[in-house]
Image (spheres, rainbow, N blue to C red):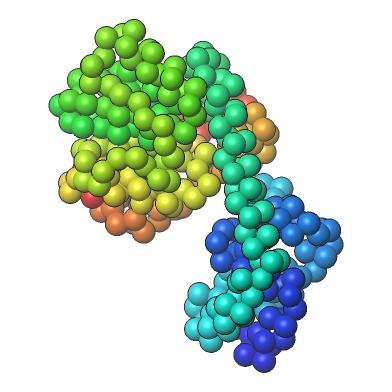
Amino acid sequence: MADSWETLKLLSDSTRVRILALLMDEELSVAELQEVLDMGQSRISSHLGLLRQGELVKDRREGKKTFYALNAGNNSVASALLKAAYASVEKTEEVANDRANLKRILEKRKQKSEQYFNSVAGRLGKNYCPGRSWEAIGHFLLHLTPKIKIADLGAGEGLISQLLANRAESVVCVDNSPRMVEFGSELAEKNGFTNLSYKLGDIEKVPLKEKSVDLALLSQALHHAQHPQTAVEEAYRILKPGGQLIILDLLEHQFEKARELYADVWLGFSENTLYQYLKSAGFRQAKVDVVAKEEQEPNFETVLASGVK
């Protein structure tokens, strides 16, 4: 790590402190930092390059985008200096404006995903959707236990939950698209399900009580989360002791157009990444397997992960 003198030098610039202050709250791309700070790309990139050299930030490639996050967690001295620098400017007009702009940018992220799912509500099950195959769903259904309480997180229209409700004690579908919730509720009523309900909510902040369900599902939903680890931790929170989480998602791929076509935030996940999400959240008996591969290009593969609380 850079020594304290180097860190102090980096913190002597107001723009770099503003960038670090933003990254204290959220991992951001260069484009998002540009929009928040209203500065040009070359200027932002130059400062980020210096902060990366000084090991105060770290970067991560996701397709064509590069995201930046703080990297001072393992250096107590650097962390203390950064906190002191932030404390000295947190009430300034510039920092207040930055935080307001950041809130707007994060809301824009959320709305982009919501707009996509609102637009396809009522059609999602009829159109092509990566990873949604009867072969994969068959593996998914093998994990069911009769007469239990189930939470389907990021459920969309709740096509899987419609099947589960035939045997489960109760099923709650959670989705952040108002139109999806409306359409799913109408479908449940039409099909006469009294044990199937829909709630508007985010999988990273599930509107259910802790220790309230026996089984939590994340079926082709995790790659739409801004913070997948948080979503897995929320699933852990709402599960009863001994409850199970099942994740059905895409294996890591390079089909960049998925972001535009399906509002994907992540291009799937590696088996190791899903395993680490489960273990970090506290799940035991974590297991991850590839269960299907599509024949047509781009040959999406589906991965099934599970863990017990």
Residue projecting furthest to the bottom: 5
Q: Which quarter of the rendering shows the N terminus?
A: bottom right
- The answer to whether 36 appears left or right of 297 in the picture is right
- The answer to whether 231 appears left or right of 104 in the picture is left
**How many labels were placed on the picture?**
0
Q: Give the answer, above or below, for where 167 lies relative to 233.
A: above
Which quarter of the figure has residue 4? bottom right
Nearest the camera: 239 or 268? Answer: 239
Q: Position of residue 79 (x, y in %)?
A: 54, 80
Q: Give the answer, above or below, for where 309 lies relative to 20.
A: above
Q: Position of residue 111 (x, y in %)?
A: 59, 36
* Residue depicted at 78% across the width and 57% down the height: 38
Q: Give the answer, above or below, for where 99 lies relative to 235.
A: below
Q: Is residue 136 visible?
A: no
Nearest the camera: 38 or 211? Answer: 38
Nearest the camera: 278 or 139? Answer: 278
Which quarter of the figure has residue 196? top left
* Residue depicted at 67% across the width and 33% down the height: 260
- The answer to whether 179 appears left or right of 143 in the picture is right
* Residue depicted at 32% across the width and 11% down the height: 189
Q: Give the answer, above or below, for where 274 lies relative to 128.
A: below
Q: Is residue 208 visible?
A: yes
Q: Position of residue 174 (x, y in %)?
A: 38, 32
Q: Position of residue 26 (x, y in %)?
A: 57, 58
- The answer to whether 165 appears left or right of 50 in the picture is left
* Residue depicted at 34% across the width and 55% down the height: 281
Residue projecting furthest to the left: 147
